Amino acid sequence: MANRSVISVHTKPETSKRLDELATLTRRSKSFLANEAIERYLNEEEAFVNSVRQGMADVAEGRVYETDEVRARLNEFVAERSANKSDS
């Protein structure tokens, strides 16, 4: 068995019941399902934090656009897409 660490989690009774039911339905252990859920959560949160950090670095380096410039670029893009669709 691979190295494992044990943690204890306190949940609402409803959450525990849902985990029990899903474990039964999927024929997986509650530990397996909880570990999968934690892994997914960590991946999503780490990606979010990294995106925020990148955004903050972009701001610090001046890699930003004014709202009016973004609107103008979006309007140009939409106009080009509309023109391309009507050419088809």
Image: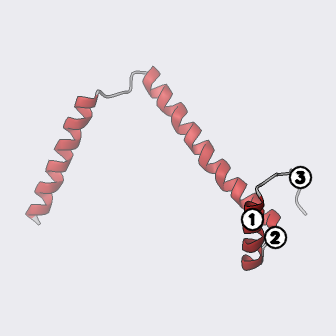
- Seen in the image, is 80 located left or right of residue 28? left
Count of all numbered marks drawn on residues in the image: 3
Quadrant into which the C terminus falls: bottom left
* Position in image of residue 7 (x %, y %): 86, 50
Work out which residue is located at the far front of the displayed protein and give it.
13
Residue shown at the point (23%, 42%) measured from the top left? 74
Q: Earlier in the sequence, mark 3 or mark 2?
A: 3
Q: Which mark is residue 29?
A: 2
Q: Residue 70, relative to residue 3: is it above or below?
A: above
Q: Earlier in the sequence, mark 3 or mark 1?
A: 3
* Position in image of residue 11 (x %, y %): 78, 54
Q: Residue 35, relative to residue 42: is it above or below?
A: below
Distance between the alpha carbons at the discs numbered 3 and 2: 15 Å
In this view, the residue in front, 6 or 9, is 9
Q: Which secondary structure, mark 3?
A: loop
Q: Residue 47, relative to residue 84: is it above or below?
A: above
Q: Which mark is residue 88?
A: none
Q: Name the colour scheme.
A: secondary structure
Q: To which residue does mark 3 refer? A: 6
> Does the CB distance between marks 2 and 1 fall below 8 Å?
yes
Q: Amino acid at mark 2?
A: Ser
Q: Quadrant of residue 2?
A: bottom right
Q: Amino acid at mark 3?
A: Val
**Mark 3 crowd level (few <14, some 14–19, many ≥20, 10 Å Cα):** few
* Position in image of residue 61 (x %, y %): 44, 21
Residue shown at the point (75%, 65%) measured from the top left? 33
Q: Which mark is residue 33?
A: 1
* Position in image of residue 75 (x %, y %): 18, 43
Quadrant into which the N terminus falls: bottom right
Q: Amino acid at mark 1?
A: Leu
